[in-house]
Image (spheres, rainbow, N blue to C red):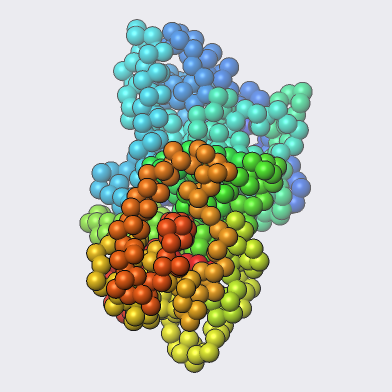
């Protein structure tokens, strides 16, 4: 439709509104070119002034739709499906109906991703929108098939009822409809109270309505508008929430929506939009401890796996959920005991679960987001024409990249703070272990970039510490690893070169070595754990542990017997028998099993200035 035709249609629409009792003397409907149509103030509208009124006869409700479709439907429809059937019938079949002036001013094309070309859709690869579009199309196609079945096979509408037309109608609904529940109130603030109701429309809510004129107002996040519903007549009046100057656009506020929601439901992006977010869905269903971890999360009232990350702001339940996902089997065992003992206390998951879990949770999130950022980078070079759809898609994905980069940078800074904090703890013989491992832990920051803890390097060689990267200090001084730690104990390192065992056994031996060797920098940290018991050592208290850990205990016993007393005979100063008994060997194996941390490659790279892989180690503070 060219501009001249559109202006004529707008005038017919305005005449139709006024002829049927609408009051809009202070408003002017304008053609806004490529941005569609808009509503403008003919004269100044004052704050709290009632400037328009729509009678109930002009509200398209389910009853209106059923009346118009009484000779078309053989099976009743409801919600979005009913509205879509009405819109298709009015646009393509019943072309001279009462509603024609309204139907004629509806957009014939849209810029939502549901209407993107194959080339434009390539720009959404690797984004949450890619999957949202697939899900929405599948949902709408199933709904479309239901409408097909509901339409009488003899009705003229059968020819017009194809999926492209259904997508058009569904987008009219997603971008313009409101829930009928909004008509059952006396006064509503559309910008706040209704935003959850408005979301129901996009989900196919069961009582949606179309409100001619109100649905024509464009979105402005700061717009203040309220409405009054007359309880007797059912008419709706619009009331200004602030002054609107003559000639200015009279805007609506679609609610607190990110550009992902605006693009998918309405076909535009707001700029700037502080509500932009990156949607992630955490999936831990393949975790061997899935059932137990789900029970912990349910006890904490966390049941949603969907999280929406904004720049500089992590969702409230994201870190608590990641803490659970980062837990070892030992963590899960002891935390479930805490829950069973005090089921009403759910604050434990909003607090620190120890330095190890805090780091693991952040490493886990940073790995996840880094992977998603790499996917966006790898799919960025797509040749496409400079269409409006392509511009919107590029704006959307560029904003996602900014959110991911900002969040990853914040996580890295937080990781560095925690690693420096760990170094200071080791230097001062303090710890931040969970309470089931050792008493006397000091508190930790629980939100990214929310640390007030003094992380200034401490210890004897402060000058050395200040000259090193946090990750380098952490890897060389704090974490017990085969790459770094064994080099600091030449006698032990030379001894274990003579034996062929896996890394876990070497770490188990090294834990016992640190316990026996008082000069070890980890001696105090290991001794602090003497009262800790891995669940496999709790057979007397909990016989069910035999089923879970019997095989592990038998294997570790066999490994111990294969090493001792042979190692003691060859290296008596390194492996004194009284410090390497089978009982202590099992205890140390439990520590290795419980205290693992995998330091990501980016930390290793920062520490050694080369591209290395993740480093596995033990964090005992």
Q: Is residue 118 above or below residue 56?
A: below
| Residue 36 visible in image | no
Residue 41 in the figure: left or right of residue 91: right
Residue at the location (64% across, 41% down)?
Answer: 340
- Is residue 320 visible in the rendered image? The answer is yes
The x, y position of residue 496, in whole percent, is 29, 71
Residue 167 sits in quarter: top left
Residue 126 lies, in percent from the top left, at: 33, 51
Q: Residue at x 52, y 19 (%)?
A: 78
- Outermost residue to the left: 383
Which residue is at the front of the view, 455 or 72? 455
- Number of numbered discs: 0
Q: Residue at the bottom extreme? A: 463
Q: Residue at x 50, y 75 (%)?
A: 523
At horizontal 38% and vertical 9% (from top left) the residue drawn is: 152
83 and 606: which is toward the camera:
606
Q: Is residue 170 above or below residue 32?
A: above
Quadrant containing the N terminus in the rendered view: top left
Quadrant housing residue 442: bottom right
Image location (x, y in percent) of residue 319: 54, 55
Residue 210 lies left or right of residue 131; in this view the side is right
In the displayed structure, 170 sits above or below 420; it is: above
Instruction: Give percent across and percent down for residue 138.
Output: 36, 31
Looking at the image, which is closer to me, 178 or 388? 178
Closer to the camera in the image, 3 or 475: 475
């Amino acid at each position: 439709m060219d501009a001249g035709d559109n202006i004529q249609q707008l005038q017919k629409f305005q005449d139709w509104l006024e002829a049927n009792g609408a009051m809009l003397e202070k408003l002017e409907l304008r053609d806004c070119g490529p941005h569609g149509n808009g509503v403008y103030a003919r004269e100044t509208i004052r704050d709290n002034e009632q400037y328009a009124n729509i009678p109930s006869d002009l509200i398209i409700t389910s009853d209106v739709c059923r009346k118009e479709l009484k000779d078309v439907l053989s099976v009743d429809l409801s919600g979005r499906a009913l509205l879509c059937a009405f819109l298709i019938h009015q646009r393509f079949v019943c072309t001279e109906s009462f509603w024609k002036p309204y139907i004629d001013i509806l957009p014939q094309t849209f810029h939502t991703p549901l209407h993107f070309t194959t080339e434009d859709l390539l720009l959404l690869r690797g984004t949450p929108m890619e999957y949202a579009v697939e899900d929405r199309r599948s949902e709408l196609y199933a709904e479309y098939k239901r409408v097909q079945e509901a339409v009488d096979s003899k009705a003229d509408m059968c020819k017009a009822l194809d999926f492209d037309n259904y997508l058009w109608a569904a987008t009219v609904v997603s971008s313009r409809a409101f829930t009928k529940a909004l008509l059952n109130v006396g006064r509503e603030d559309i910008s706040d109270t209704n935003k959850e109701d408005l979301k129901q429309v996009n989900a196919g809510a069961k009582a949606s309505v179309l409100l001619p004129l109100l649905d024509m107002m464009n979105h402005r996040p700061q717009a203040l508008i309220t409405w009054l519903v007359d309880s007797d007549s059912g008419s709706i009046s619009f009331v200004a929430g602030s002054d609107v100057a003559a000639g200015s656009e009279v805007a609506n506020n679609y609610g607190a929506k990110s550009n992902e929601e605006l693009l998918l439901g309405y076909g535009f992006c707001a700029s700037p939009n502080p509500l932009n977010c990156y949607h992630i869905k955490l999936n831990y269903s393949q975790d061997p401890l899935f059932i137990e971890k789900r029970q912990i999360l349910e006890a904490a009232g966390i049941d949603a796996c969907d999280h929406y990350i904004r720049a500089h702001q992590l969702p409230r339940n994201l870190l608590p959920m990641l803490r659970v996902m980062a837990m070892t089997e030992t963590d899960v065992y002891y935390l479930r005991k805490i829950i069973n003992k005090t089921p009403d206390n759910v604050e434990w998951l909003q607090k620190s679960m120890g330095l190890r879990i805090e780091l693991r949770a952040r490493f886990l999130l940073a790995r996840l987001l880094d992977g998603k950022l790499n996917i966006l980078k790898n799919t960025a070079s797509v040749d496409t024409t400079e269409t409006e759809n392509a511009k919107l898609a590029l704006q959307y994905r560029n904003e996602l990249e900014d959110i991911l980069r900002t969040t990853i940078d914040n996580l890295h800074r937080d990781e560095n703070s925690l690693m420096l904090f760990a170094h200071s703890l080791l230097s001062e013989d303090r710890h931040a272990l969970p309470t089931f491992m050792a008493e006397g832990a000091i508190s930790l920051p629980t939100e990214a970039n929310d640390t007030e803890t003094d992380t200034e390097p401490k210890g004897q060689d402060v000058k050395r510490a200040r000259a090193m990267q946090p990750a380098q200090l952490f890897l060389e001084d704090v974490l017990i690893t085969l790459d770094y730690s064994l080099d600091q104990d030449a006698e032990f390192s030379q001894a274990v070169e003579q034996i062929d065992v896996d890394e876990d056994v070497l770490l188990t031996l090294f834990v016992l070595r640190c316990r026996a060797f008082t000069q070890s920098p980890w001696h105090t940290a290991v001794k602090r754990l003497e009262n800790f018991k891995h669940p496999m050592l709790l057979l007397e208290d909990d016989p069910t542990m035999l089923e879970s850990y019997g095989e592990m205990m038998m294997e570790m016993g066999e490994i111990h017997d294969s090493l001792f007393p042979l190692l003691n005979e060859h290296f008596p100063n390194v492996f004194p028998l009284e410090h390497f008994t089978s009982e202590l060997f099992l205890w140390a194996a439990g520590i290795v099993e419980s205290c693992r941390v995998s330091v990501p490659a980016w930390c290793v790279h920062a520490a050694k200035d080369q591209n290395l892989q993740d480093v596995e180690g033990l964090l005992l503070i």
